[in-house]
Amino acid sequence: MSFTLPESLEALALRYDAFFIDLWGVLHDGTALYDGAIETLKELRRHHKKIVLISNAPRKTEKVLETLERLGITDSYYDTLITSGQAAHDMLARSNQWGLHYYYLGPSKDEDVIADLPYEKTDIAAHAAFVLNAGFEQDFQSTDDILPTLNRLLKARLPLICINPDMEVVKQDGTRMWCAGWVARRYEEMGGSVTYVGKPYPLVYETAFAASGIAPARTLAIGDNLLTDIMGANHAGIDSLLITGGILKSEHGTIPDDVSLQSLCDQAGAQPTFVAPMLGSLIAS
């Protein structure tokens, strides 16, 4: 099949009233903005569109806000920011059904995600009621090195809450980093119980629709990941724009052609409404 390339960003702005936009791989790579990121947000704001930024970052919104502002994306460019970490924080604030003692699995930079809640962190698996999984134990840890920890947690029969369902992220220079989603899926394969918070799961979309107040038929999701952004949009009943110049380009060394891309969509069980290499390409067209 042939994928649809939007005529322009303005054409999308005429068709949709709300835009759910991914961060990493679409607007930035954690360090630098992608070409056209700011211009895209400005153009959508010029058309008075609702913009909800949705990230699978395993941290509260206040920390992601700091990153966005450092990159030049101020709150004047969007209406709401939703992170999987904040969604998990709020979920755990509403219910302590998993218990009050937890084992934290992730890098130290994100271990404060529920520090303000009445939960107690323990480094002893036998004393924990659940695992809060924000990633690997440190950035760039190998998949083999984390297995002993997973075995220990599995032996303690601990349910795991994954607050970043992404398998990996990629920087513009091609550097790839495994994420909590890889850990959670491996834990499931080993027989562990996992609860996911973030794209493509419903909670963040329910929050996004409440924030935008726009009907699904007039909402477009933009992201670079088939398994999170596009699958999540499919499940939420909204149209989607797949950016192929992000993680797909990194994984395959080049932007997939239509035949290869359709094969990837079939494998993922996710189908975008539109595709574009980068957001900036829509501004230039």
Image (cartoon, rainbow, N blue to C red):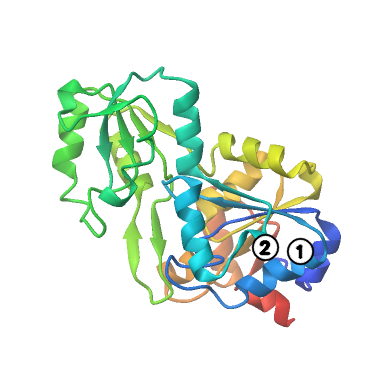
Quadrant the C terminus occupies: bottom right
Q: Is residue 86 above or below residue 36?
A: above
Check if mark 1's residue and mark 2's residue have beta carbons within 8 Å: yes
The amino acid type found where label 2 is placed reads Tyr
Q: Residue at x 57, y 73 (%)?
A: 257
Name, please, the residue furthest toward the bottom.
284
Mark pair 1, 2: CA separation: 7 Å
Can residue 6 be seen by looking at this rendering? no
Q: Secondary structure at mark 1?
A: helix
Q: Secondary structure at mark 2?
A: helix
Which residue is disc 1 drawn over?
45
Q: Residue at x 75, y 65 (%)?
A: 44
Of residues 264 and 13, the one drawn nearer to the viewer in this rendering: 13
Instruction: Give the quadrant of residue 168.
Output: bottom left
Q: Residue at x 45, y 34 (%)?
A: 89
Of residues 124 and 257, the one drawn nearer to the viewer in this rendering: 124
Instruction: Give the quadrant of residue 178.
Output: bottom left
* Residue 159 picture location, percent across and down: 32, 26
Which residue is disc 2 drawn over?
77
